[in-house]
Amino acid sequence: QVQLVESGGGLVQAGGSLRLSCAASGRTFSNYDMGWFRQAPGKEREFVAVIRRSGSTTYYRESVKGRFTISRDNAKNTVSLQMNSLKPEDTAVYYCAARHFSRTDYDYWGQGTQVTVSS
């Protein structure tokens, strides 16, 4: 089992910044790719960003490229999402998720943290 706890959400004005963090415990953190997802009211959950277990490779959804940065610290078992130039359409509950490097599906999810961007 991997336990994931997100923090750092909140209310921010458009153009502002937030940094989300996810603390992992349980299994060997460096064996897991780590992703961030989000779900807005009335919408399906969507992929935001992923970082491979070594930290050397990252992928982002098109709409956040150049504004969001995912990073990880394998020594501290944490993954972060730095969000800059936030837009009202970024408003959602953000979830941290873990995927074992040998698998294609995310097996573990955090409880989510609310991000609200006001216009």
Image (cartoon, rainbow, N blue to C red):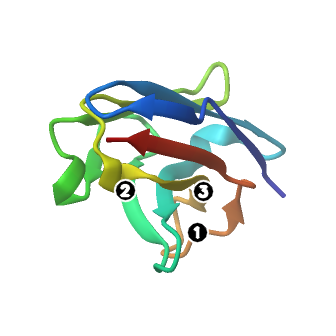
Query: Which of these two is toward me, 112 or 91?
Result: 91
Q: Is residue 90 left or right of residue 28?
A: left
Q: Which residue is mark 1?
A: 106
| Circles 2 and 1 in contact, beta carbons < 8 Å | no
The residue at the far front in this view is 119
Label located before the other in sequence (2 or 1): 2
Identified by mark 2, the residue type is Val
Q: Are marks 3 and 2 in contact (CB under 8 Å)?
A: no
Sequence-wise, the earlier of marks 3 and 1 is 3
Which corner quadrant of the image does residue 73 belong to? top right
Alpha carbons under labels 3 and 1: distance apart:
6 Å
Q: Quadrant of the N terminus?
A: bottom right
Disc nearest the viewer among 3 and 2 = 2
Identify residue type, mark 3.
Answer: Ala
Mark 3 lies on a secondary structure that is strand
Residue that mark 2 sits on: 48
Q: Earlier in the sequence, mark 3 or mark 2?
A: 2
- CA–CA distance in space, label 3 to label 2: 11 Å
Q: From this viewpoint, is residue 93 visible?
A: yes
Against 48, is 107 above or below?
below
